[in-house]
Image: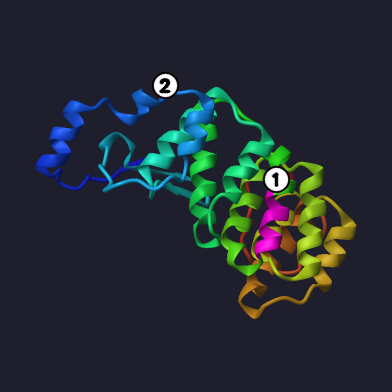
Amino acid sequence: MWRFRRPPRATPACRWGSKRFPPLAELVKTWSFEQIRAQVGAPVGPKVVEPAFIASRTDGDLQVVSSDTRDWVLITELARRGLTAQQVVELLGDVKPPRLFDRLVVIEEALRRGGKGPAPETYFPQAMELCRQIGKPADRAVSTLYRIVARKCPAAGEAEALKDLKQGVFMEGPLTYVGACSRSMDTLGMLEQLSGPQDLRNVKDLEVDDIRRRLRLPLKNPGLPDNHPDEDGGE
């Protein structure tokens, strides 16, 4: 679902500039991959808002809002040509921790629009290692990474989630992943014994019952809703 925002009123300089120069999305098609990549994150002058790119999309718990139109256009063109898993991780590593989440959702949206590029499970382990090096400031990006990779529930995702749950730095993302994907009695047992932050206790209870529901086991908290009702085993 798209929600378009009304762009700010253009100044005379912006209106003049938009007539004189081609839109960036058209201009970058004439650049080499290396030229585009070198421009991602490069400092620029005052931003010229291009209404075609001021939009947001909600996909489950992911809300994509481009805060930097220029980088959004550049990364979308890179994705259209094809990015490797290593290049995705390098794009994530280009930004400082406070902007990691913003860069991640721009990349995810660019890959979706471009139709080319690596599957999330191929760059997920490296991206998680990057986040672990950053630590707690990467928590929001980590939760987003787990939600993205949970769409296909790769086996490697559960191993990463269990690693994070044991370390205790990132909790919400791994909990969401195992609740959405796990069919393991061992994981269920570990999760039931897990002690975590008080504010995530309800999240843990939900995910425990989602795994129990998937395994056709009695629910611990039958009054709680099914957190993943569209999956096999949901009621």
Residue visible at 73% across and 43% down in the picture: 153
Is residue 88 placed above or below 187 in the rendered structure?
A: above
- The magenta region covers 127-134
Residue 159 within the magenta-colored segment of the rendering: no
Secondary-structure class at tag 1:
helix
Residue 157, percent from left and from top? 76, 48
Q: Residue at x 85, y 59 (%)?
A: 187
By secondary structure, the bulk of the magenta-drawn segment is best described as helix
Please, what is the three-letter code of the amino acid marked with disc 2? Lys
Is the residue marked by circle 1 packed among few (<14), some (14-19), or many (20+) residues within 10 Å?
A: many
Instruction: Kindly tell me whether residue 121 is visible in this rendering.
Output: yes
The answer to which of marks 1 and 2 sits earlier in the sequence is: 2
Q: Position of residue 204 (x, y in %)?
A: 70, 68
Q: Residue furthest top?
A: 30
Query: Foreground residue, 42 or 49?
Result: 42
Q: Is residue 218 above or below residue 113?
A: below
Q: Nearer the viewer, residue 194 or 227?
A: 194
The disc label shown at residue 29, or none: 2
The residue to which callout 1 is attached is 124
Mark 1 touches mark 2? (CB < 8 Å)? no
Residue depicted at x 41% and y 35%: 73
Residue in the foreground of this view, choosing between 170 and 231: 170
- Between disc 1 and disc 2, the foreground one is 2
Give percent across and percent down for residue 210. Answer: 72, 57
Dot 2: element: helix
Name the side, left or right, on which 47 lies relative to 163: left
Quadrant where the N terminus is found in the figure: top left
In the rendered image of this protein, does residue 141 appear above or below residue 117?
Answer: below
Q: Distance from label 1 to label 2 (Cα)? A: 28 Å
Q: Is residue 63 left or right of residue 172?
A: left
Based on the picture, tell me whether residue 131 belongs to the magenta stretch: yes
